[in-house]
Image (spheres, helix red, strand yellow):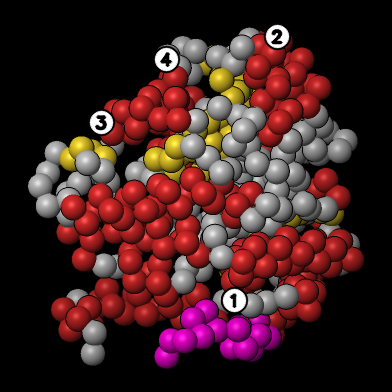
Amino acid sequence: MSFLERDDPEVAAIIENERQRQVFGLELIASENVVSRAVMEATGSIMCNKYAEGYPGKRYYGGCEHHDVVENIARDRLCSLFSAEHANVQPHSGSQANQAVYFATIQPGDVIMSQSLTQGGHLSHGSPVNISGKLYDVHSYGVDYETEILDYSAIADMARQVKPKMIVCGASAYPREIDFKAFGEIADEVGAICVADIAHIAGLVAAGIHNSPIDVCRFTTTTTHKTLRGPRGGAILCRKGDGPLIDKSVFPGLQGGPLMHVIAAKAVCFKEALEPSYVEYAKQVVKNARVLAETLAENDLRVCSGGTDNHLALLDLSDHGITGLEAEVALGCAGITVNKNTIPREKRSPFVTSGLRVGTPTVTSRGMKEDEMKMIGDWIGRVLKNINDKNIHKMVKEEVSELCGKFPLYPDAV
Ligand SMILES: *Cc1c(COP(=O)(O)O)cnc(C)c1O
């Protein structure tokens, strides 16, 4: 019996239910992944007991000697992973990494330019309901209506007009490679600070499959838990000269004590991402996404922008008269977890949407390859074509669960 089962059977039972859901379901949410046992062990370790406000060698509490070592290792590994000069591994999340960069460099009321939330951007890039949208004067750029791809000359024109202090690039629901160099050049031309948010694609950048913003954008922010496959958290990368500015902004500017158990787990994740096997993993993520998108297209589903270069694809369901919400619910009944998503040509509200976002990081971590992607794509097609047929959803769920049985979440665990 575990300590949790003994001391809190109620929560233990919930966690067991969630374990079953993860083990027997197909997780296609593009921002999720499955961490290694080592990452999980570090996250659940005794490092969680310590306050370590400050930075290695400059803490506000005693007893931080081991925390200093692990935070230095995490910073060094992250710098080598991305060939960066300076890393801050303390942001509690991707959103806080972004806030820290804004807080370090711009003033309330300043003009920023970022990708619109409905066309793939992120809440923390200036959505009106987010603190970023309340503090700054946000101008959003989108994708081209026809191609559904970023149009850099249109973005440059907009930058010349609105003269932003900052340009934020990077997205949560954009299936194509982002040209960070183009963004850096646009920012330089108009005298703006360029921030690249690689939260989703960090693992692909680390593996060299996606171009890197490090030398071409002044600041790079990321999460550590999406393609990078680490614990939930954020990080910031920049040049040495900007290091003190960023560090001061994260602490004491924005946060109190760092989550040292998470920083230990980040260090473990960065070590894993530096291994050749991680590069193989990241390549497979992209191959899988391509095959999944092709299979969905063969099932008469419209894939936005005509395909994918990264770990995710966006589907436009409007031709079939179904909403993203209906599709999310039906696929959920079939054991396939996806999220409804607004699409570039969206006509519905963000709670309903006309689209779905599907991603391959989690299924690839389970060892699934091209053949399994074809099966999954066909199952999605079958469910969406029979959106109200509960029997078909149940039949697909049985097949899903059989496939999942062959690809255990944690092969080394009981
Ligand atoms: C997920 C994401 C974030 C924020 O991550 P949280 O850790 O959930 O705060 C920031 N930017 C982008 C582009 C993201 O996709």
Q: Looking at the image, is 105 positioned above or below residue 118?
A: above
Q: Looking at the image, is 37 positioned above or below residue 46?
A: below
Q: Residue at x 47, y 86 (%)?
A: 412
Mark sitting earlier along the chain (2/3)? 2
Mark 1, residue position: 366
Magenta highlight range: 398-414
Query: Residue 223 placed where, x, y %?
Result: 49, 48
For label 1, the crowd category at 10 Å Cα-Cα, with few meaning under 14, some 14 to 19 and many 20 or more, is some
Mark sitting earlier along the chain (1/4)? 4
Mark 2, residue position: 161
For label 2, the crowd category at 10 Å Cα-Cα, with few meaning under 14, some 14 to 19 and many 20 or more, is few
Residue kind at label 2, given as amino acid type: Gln
Separation of disc 3 and disc 4 at Cα?
19 Å
Residue kind at label 1, given as amino acid type: Arg
- In the rendered structure, find residue 108 and report the number of the disc placed on it: 4
Mark 3, residue position: 252
Separation of disc 2 and disc 1 at Cα?
47 Å
- In the rendered structure, find residue 243 and report the number of the disc placed on it: none
Residue kind at label 4, given as amino acid type: Pro
Please state if 290 lies on the left or on the right of 94 as rendered.
Answer: right
> For numbered disc 3, what is the local secondary structure?
helix
* Quadrant into which the N terminus falls: bottom left
